[in-house]
Structure formats: C-alpha cells, structure tokens
Image (cartoon, helix red, strand yellow):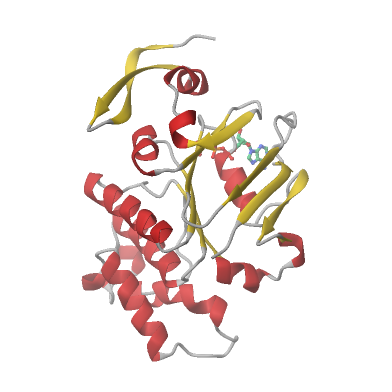
C-alpha cells in the first residue's frame, strides 16, 4: 500500500505562470482522473509525478519520501507509467516486451525466473493478448499495442499506476476492460491516476478528479463534487448536456462552443 503526494507542486511549463500549487495525496484504493483541454499540462503533470520531469517548485513524495531521495529502481518497483505514445526499440516479441515489467526486480545480468514468466503470462491473459505472445510488437495493431503497455505495467506489479490516456486506440469494450482493470487494481489497494479526455469514463470509474486549466489554475476533490456541468464547460470551453443513466451523471457535448 503506497501513497503519492504532490506538495506545493508547480509543474514546469515554459512561459506559463505558476498557477495553483498542487497539494494532494493519492491514497490506496483511489482512482484519480486529470481532466483538461489539450495543452493544459496533463502529461507534464503525470511525468512530474513519476519523477521523470523536474518540477518548477515543490516536490513529489512517495510514501512521504521525496522522489529526489529515491533511486530510479526503487521508484520503478512502486510506480508504473503507461505513456501516451511509445516507439519500438529493437525488435521484440509480445512476451519479451511484457517481461520488461520485471526489470525493476532483477539485477543487470539476471534472467527471468519461472515466476516472472508466470506473471507475464497472467498479465497477457488479463489484457486478452495470450494468443499473440510470440508475435513481434511491430506487427500489432494500435489497440493491441496499447493493451501490451497495460500488460507490461501490470507485470511490474506497481503500487501506483500513472497512465496517460490509457483508452487511446482501444475500442469501446477494451476501454471498459481497461477501466475495470484499474478498478480491480484499486480494489486490492493500488492507487491509480489517469489522464483522460473521456469525461464519461471519469464519471463512471474515478473517485477523485483534478481539473487542470491551460493557465495553470487547478482544483481537485471527490469526483461527485468536481463533475459539475458549468465547471466542465468552462474547462473545455464547450457546452455540455448532462444526463443520468442508472443514477449516474454523464456528459455529452452540445453543438455550441463557448466563445472566449
Ligand atoms: N519542451 C517544451 N517547450 C515548450 N513548451 C512545451 C515543452 N513541452 C511541453 N510544452 C507545452 O506545455 C504544454 C503542456 O503540454 P502537455 O503535453 O503536458 O499537455 P496535455 O494537457 O497533456 O495535452 P494533450 O491533451 O494535448 O495531450 C503544451 O502547451 C506544450 O506545447
């Protein structure tokens, strides 16, 4: 069980005012969504929380310890990052790729154990990729690659998930499967933070929401309080229609845009 905290954190976006210093803790069992328009800084925030990008001010703490004091391998045993885009390195199969998730637990010249293989195969099964384990990654479809990224993170057995647009390239069913995977992870005490463009996935699955504005202002809190139509309309500068299905709120874009 681990926590990840932003402490008076200002992310470093060139030529932008500091905005609102971010101060929150993601607890085990919580699923946070970062929502905001293109360019608001969602990816920059996710990379900063992962320790991959230095903040302008403040710090990120993993279990109350500043990320600056931790070695990358220690961080990688706790935090998995699913990137928005990825490039093929050298030619590798699906199984070889998912096994990369075990690297934080291995010494440089170690080979994977039978247990590592078992974890890798379980991750492939959970992302419906078992049949593709011998395929070269370069031959996969966009959605299959996205599921492979989720499988690799799963194989890492992280306490904290940071995933940037995890629904990218996924069809509707696989989007739901991915959100169920995060919900299962949260149920067993993992903490999850997702950058999302889909308000309805956030409304359906997330416990907490952080709204990030392009000028650096931000607010955050429990999902039911943050998902207010007027606040979301201001965030996206887009009119929304709110509806309810099975007692849950959903948002659909109306035809009008909110002009400056
Ligand atoms: N190296 C850089 N130099 C200048 N500006 C940068 C640099 N890196 C990022 N930015 C800018 O920082 C802002 C935030 O980018 P970021 O990718 O974090 O946004 P985002 O909210 O994830 O956007 P999207 O929804 O389009 O993925 C953007 O305006 C981007 O152009």
Please provide percent x and percent y for residue 32: 49, 45
Residue found 37% across the figure and 54% down from its top:
183
Viewer-proximal residue among 117 and 85: 117
Q: Is residue 147 left or right of residue 32?
A: left
146 versus 69 height, above or below: above
User: Residue at the location (29% across, 63% down)?
Assistant: 127
Which quarter holds ligand 1? Answer: top right
Q: Is residue 128 at least partly visible in the picture?
A: yes
- x, y percentage for residue 25? 61, 49
Q: Residue at x 33, y 53 (%)?
A: 178
Q: Quadrant of the C terminus?
A: top right
Q: Is residue 66 left or right of residue 87?
A: right
Identify the image quadrant of residue 21. Answer: top right
Give the percent coordinates (x, y) of residue 87.
Answer: 47, 59
Q: Quadrant of the N terminus?
A: bottom right
Count of numbered badges drawn on the protein: 0
Going 60% across and 86% down the picture, which residue do you hit?
A: 108
Where is residue 69 shown, x and y percent of the image? Answer: 76, 66
Q: Quadrant of residue 134?
A: bottom left
Relative to residue 111, is residue 68 depicted above or below? above
């Amino acid at each position: 069980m681990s926590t990840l905290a932003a402490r008076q954190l200002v992310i470093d976006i060139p030529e932008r005012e500091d905005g609102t210093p971010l101060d929150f803790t993601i607890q085990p069992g919580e699923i946070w969504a970062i929502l905001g328009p293109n360019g608001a800084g969602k990816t920059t925030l996710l990379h900063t929380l992962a320790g991959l990008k230095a903040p302008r001010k403040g710090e990120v703490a993993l279990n109350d310890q500043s990320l600056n004091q931790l070695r990358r391998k220690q961080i990688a045993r706790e935090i998995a990052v699913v990137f928005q885009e990825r490039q093929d390195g050298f030619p590798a199969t699906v199984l070889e790729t998912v096994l990369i998730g075990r690297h934080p637990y291995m010494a440089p010249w170690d080979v994977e154990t039978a247990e590592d293989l078992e974890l890798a195969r379980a991750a492939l099964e959970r992302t419906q990729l078992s049949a593709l384990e011998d395929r070269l990654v370069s031959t996969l479809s966009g959605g299959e690659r996205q599921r492979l990224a989720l499988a690799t993170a799963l194989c890492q057995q992280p306490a904290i998930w940071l995933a940037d647009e995890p629904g990218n390239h996924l069809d509707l069913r696989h989007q739901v499967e991915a959100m169920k995977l995060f919900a299962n992870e949260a149920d067993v005490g993992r903490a999850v933070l997702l950058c999302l463009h889909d308000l309805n996935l956030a409304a359906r699955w997330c416990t907490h929401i952080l709204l990030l504005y392009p000028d650096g202002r931000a607010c955050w809190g429990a999902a039911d309080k943050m998902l207010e139509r007027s606040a979301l309309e201001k965030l996206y500068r887009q009119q929304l229609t709110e509806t309810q299905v099975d007692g849950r709120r959903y948002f659909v874009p109306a035809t009008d845009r909110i002009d400056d």
